[in-house]
Amino acid sequence: MGRTPLEMATVDMWERRADFGGMLAVAENFRNRFPPFAERAIPGAQGVAQIPELVDRGRDSVLRFYGHLERRLSDVPYLAGETMTLADISAMCVIDFALFCEIEISADCPHLRKWYDGMEARESAKAHPGLVGLLGNYSKMMAG
């Protein structure tokens, strides 16, 4: 996405930030938190025990990611600039996953909250129930 090399690079940069700065942090919290992953704390491996301290580290990393998004969204309406791109969709997925893990957008991130609410209000977002909606019943199973 993007029309110029700079726009394409900006989309790619924010897409990677969502993946590496956001999704990996949420996954660290998730895989070390829920009982079904007790012996699968890293993807693709069995017999790898959870490390409870990584739940907090994952949450703290997500909150730092939120701070990066907040700073960016105080300057532009979307992560890559003036137009919604794949980077915004990826960041929204990170937040949906984080909300499932009970990592909320804090009050000190008003630009992020406004952006997220706007993303949720889009027709395409309304067409699906979101991760919490999809996994709502699954969350009971995750409790143990």
Image: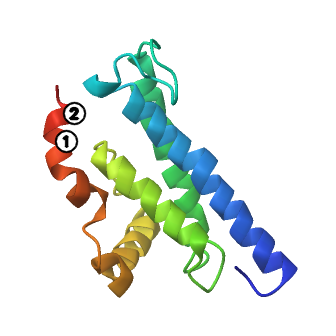
Q: Secondary structure at mark 1?
A: helix
Q: Is residue 12 above or below residue 61?
A: below
Mark on residue 56?
none
Residue 67 visible in image: yes
Q: Is residue 122 left or right of residue 20?
A: left
Q: Is residue 140 above or below residue 5?
A: above
Q: Is residue 22 left or right of residue 99?
A: right
Q: Quadrant of the C terminus?
A: top left
Q: Is residue 37 left or right of residue 47?
A: left
Q: At x 41% / y 56%, what residue is drawn?
A: 95
Disc 2 packing (10 Å; few <14; some 14–19; many ≥20): few
Q: Position of residue 15 (x, y in %)?
A: 64, 62
Q: In this figure, which residue is indicated by the disc labeled 2?
A: 142
Q: At x 34% / y 75%, what residue is drawn?
A: 120
Q: At x 55% / y 60%, what residue is drawn?
A: 69
Q: Position of residue 42 (x, y in %)?
A: 50, 25
Label count reads: 2
Please state which amino acid type lies under the numbered disc 2: Met
Q: At x 28% / y 26%, what residue is drawn?
A: 36
Q: Secondary structure at mark 2?
A: helix
Please state which amino acid type lies under the numbered disc 1: Ser
Q: Rounded to the nearest whole Å, what is the CA distance between mark 1 and mark 2?
A: 5 Å
Q: In this figure, which residue is indicated by the disc labeled 1?
A: 139
Q: Position of residue 137 (x, y in %)?
A: 14, 48
